[in-house]
Amino acid sequence: MNTIFITGASSGIGRATAVYFAQKGWRVIATMRNLQKAGDLADMPNVVIMSLDLTKPDEIRETCSRTLAEFDVDVLFNNAGYAIMGPFERLPEDELRKLFDTDVIGTMLVTQQFIPHFKKRRAGAILTTTSLAGIIALPRDGAYGAAKRAQQGMVETLYYELKPFGVKVASMIPGGTSTNFQIPVNILDGYEEPAAKQREYLLDGNAAFPGPEEAAHIVWTAVNDGKDQLNYPTDSVCKKLYDHYVSMDVEDFKLWFYNRLFGAEAEQERNL
């Protein structure tokens, strides 16, 4: 039986992916900080629930080594993470450190545990949920975007390191997704209007953001399509925004996006 190990499986994209792969007949190792949030996931056939807190290195080593001793894992899906948002100078130091401990250091430590396994079997895939904010810089996303760019850098490096061993490495890139994604710090002060315009940009004319089920289908595609592809936008809306970004020179996009978010406001300031 094929096996996927998922971090952050209690909700959102992680949970939707766990359900989708289990329904496809895969064994799913669904990990989460709080086992009480597993809900009916714990009762699904082929699903194994395990505790994993990315801020606890000892728990990372114990859970990963226990998993690899018992199962021949085909796919590691680094999905756990959260965001903080606000004007960069307003983000508290302790919150910056907690964010990077989870999204960056924790993800890297999990990945390190699995690399020898994948090298030895000379097959498999390591997928990581990054973000469109790790590709396109967004106001108030200085810390979260930096964390996601760090993940993106890890993914791109591992592509080169693991391709000789037949291991696929790719980024799953969500834009706005309709989940209960955690943003414990969300400071708007002075950025109310650009934040509203940014939301409009990410919605791209839609009434609501895509659900996590579409992302789960893209994860399945990335695992099974046989393509040598690095970046997978996880829904049609994000793909459109991503394709528009990569089609432009970064300097041209910078000005286009600034005018999109701040154009009228900047013009008013120039006229004062």
Image (spheres, rainbow, N blue to C red):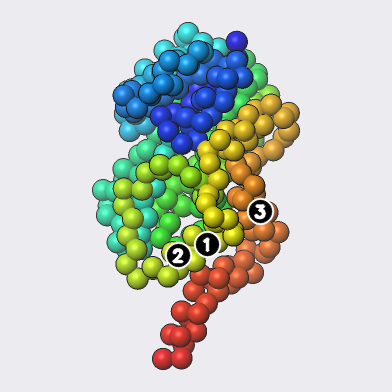
Query: Cα distance, mark 3 to mark 1?
Result: 14 Å
Q: Amino acid at mark 3?
A: Lys
- Give the label, 3 or 1, closer to the camera: 1
Task: Look at the image and tell me whether residue 109 can be seen.
Answer: no
- Give x and y (percent) for residue 236: 64, 47
State the mark number for residue 196: 2
- Give x and y (percent) for residue 131: 52, 46
Residue at the (51%, 13%) spot, across then down: 46
Query: Cα distance, mark 2 to mark 1?
Result: 6 Å
Residue at the (41%, 39%) spot, across then down: 81
Is residue 245 toward the left or the right of residue 117 in the image? right
Is residue 114 toward the left or the right of residue 84 in the image? right
Residue identified by numbered label 1: 200
Density class for disc 3 (Cα within 10 Å; few <14, some 14-19, many ≥20) is few
Residue at the (42%, 33%) spot, across then down: 11
Q: Are marks 3 and 1 in contact (CB under 8 Å)?
A: no
Q: Considering only order in the chain, which callout, 3 or 2, is on the residue closer to the N terminus?
A: 2
Q: Where does the N terminus fall, quadrant-wise? A: top right
- Give x and y (percent) for residue 189: 32, 67
Query: Which secondary structure lies at badge 1?
Result: helix
State the mark number for residue 240: 3
Q: Nearer the viewer, residue 203 or 166?
A: 203
Density class for disc 1 (Cα within 10 Å; few <14, some 14-19, many ≥20) is some
